[in-house]
Amino acid sequence: MKREPFQNFSGIAAPLPLKNINMDAIIPAPYLRTADADLAHGLFALWRYDDQGHEIADFILNRPAFRNATILFGGENFGCGSSREAAAWALKRFGIRAVFAPSFADIFYENAFRNGLLAGIITHETLAHALALISDNPAKASFAIDLSNITLTGHDGQKLPFTVPDFRREALLRGDDDIATTLRCADNIDAFMAHDRLNRPWIYETGMTP
Amino acid sequence: MSDRTLFGKIWDLHRIRSMGEGRDLIFVDRHILQETTCAAAFRGLQEAHRPVRCPTLTCATQDHIVSTELNRNAASNRGGRELISLMAKNAAAHNIRLFGLDDPRQGIVHVIGPELGLVLPGSIVACGDSHTSTAGGLGALGIGVGTSEVEHILATQTLVLPRPKTLRMSFEGKAGLGVTAKDIVLHALGTFGIAVGTGHAIEYAGPAIRALPVEGRLTICNMSIELGARLGLIAPDDATFAYIKGRPYAPQGALWESALASWQTLRTDDDARFDRELSLDISKAAPQITWGTTQEDVIGVDQALPDPSHITDHDRRERAVAMLDYMGLTPGRPIEGTPVDIVFIGSCTNARLSDLEAAAAIVRGKHVAPHVRALVVPGSSQVKRDAEHKGLDKIFTEAGFEWRSAGCSMCVSINEDIVPPGARCIATSNRNFENRQGPRARTHLASPAMAAAAAIAGGIADVRRFA
């Protein structure tokens, strides 16, 4: 999938510091039924809407101050459960460009970066500091993300560090196409298969035809 | 070298080259597609004019969104028709073998993989589904991936992945009455939590694992992702090889002999070191059942529900209060006897023939409680036929169960099989998250025998009383 290079930005940060926010919560299964579902509408759908489809007023992303959030603060083990990449797509379509949490589940972590979504790991202290800044003054819940210097800065001006592996940071900044990168190793793949076929012929002789 | 882990041996065998930063380019032996995570991948290929690199190492099935009506036809699958026909079109366009709705080999991807001999010891299997780790039960590495990675595999037959750390989880002791593979893995979840395996490949070992039949090992590895691990595996042995021999896509003749010789080396060396070691004695464990909304919120069926007023940690107490409220449970009360509305026996965790046999053994000659809707959804069309051949369908239907067609059904609830709001369901599946089985659905995870016992009793019941 094509993606745009990640650029530094400032935006509203919504606090959702629950532990174990799972993929089913981020994007419920009914939004996976068609190839072109409204994933922005589906983001956290069962937390955002009641049974009649009306907004639940006190859910964070429904509050006036956070409706246009572009940053999310989550709790430990964010994105656990299913492998559905629609969770990353839903966050992006809603407008979220960066999620910060003390830890992420493995598959979500991969999916986020592959879709140009920054998944930044922060300490519990940093999370507590950011949450305090937001609750002090929800009207000033804006943070500046500087991916080049790996900092986020709230209204108190303190630069808070986060963690992102170098190669992921660089890939985000370049907007890499993963498949194109791998296809540059096509000769290595061909050579591997030619050799492997001799060692493990049972892998290749599948008899698998449509 | 005699100090390698089983995981390391398989990984190294598939490692094409380093991609830097601790990531390797890994060859994928078998890529199985399911209908809900491949549509965008095919669209991506088409936009970039890229072909499928290895169609003969790729196959597809339809399981997530399909109707499980007993006599389903083209008119079934109301909500799923688009993705079902899109997959058929994409598979045909790229010469990919499709085990579609009208194919006798259709079924849940993690059930048909082992059943058809697509999953082989020492191989790497990938699928756009987090429960691909199931393949580890045969000593394979099953890697669950997202849609971008599905596209990447289609285009390159490889994955770029950070090499995970290794974790050995040893299970000691002998399983007590009513304690199945499902209870063992739920007990591990209750003990170690749902994030213990993050960033790791888990090898399950020890006498309690060795004693499990092959289908039980698939159940254990299936729930690796619930432990936070993308990968989980068990060393193959003679039981594994016997299970695979003669299956439709398993190697035959001379190929079988050379494969077998290779597979017999697939074990962790005695001097191997793991990044982390955990062990658990299961001999005192009772049959398990979840009470909360993550899989680590689990107790023995003979235990009482937690009482938040006894929990000192503030966060844990708050979460327990919220979970008990969502689940509609009274703190401190025994979990046994809690009335249930729905019993679901199915899913990639527990819908193989032995699972249905275990449930049928409890059900035989009894009747489902009048207020309970109980359904059995076989894991594959083959499991369904085998069960019917053994008369299990009769046992279930005479007891008042619905006997349905193969699919993921009420585990992912993306078709019509949904738990109504507020209803309580005992499920043999793998996820008890809020709203997973339907908006405000309340899910308790348990083994097939425990689910069957609950259907008969009309509430959560200790299966040991039915033995």
Image (tube, rainbow, N blue to C red):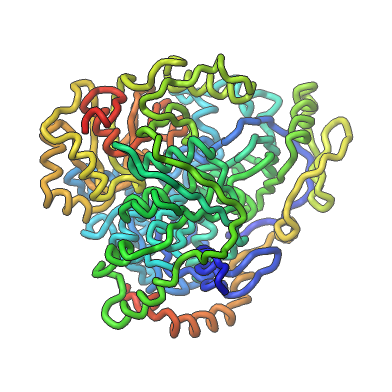
Q: How far across and how far down the image is residue A7, in percent?
A: 76, 51
User: Of A58 and A187, which appears nearest the observer?
Assistant: A187
Rendered-image quadrant of the C terminus of chain B: top left
Which residue, as the protein is rendered here, is positioned at the far right?
A: A157
Viewer-proximal residue among B102 and B232? B232
Q: Residue at x 47, y 41 (%)?
A: B188
Quarter of the N terminus of chain B within the rendering = bottom right
Q: Position of residue B411 (x, y in %)?
A: 36, 40
For residue A123, say whether it is visible: yes
Residue B360: percent from left, percent from top: 18, 39
Q: In percent of the image, x 33 and y 50: which residue is there?
A: B216
State the residue in front, B1 or A200.
B1
Asked where in the image residue B313 lies, by quadrant, the reply is top right
> Residue at image x 30%, y 83%?
B254
* Apparent side of residue A106 relative to residue B373 in the rendered image (left or right): right
Q: Is residue A131 above or below residue B378?
A: above
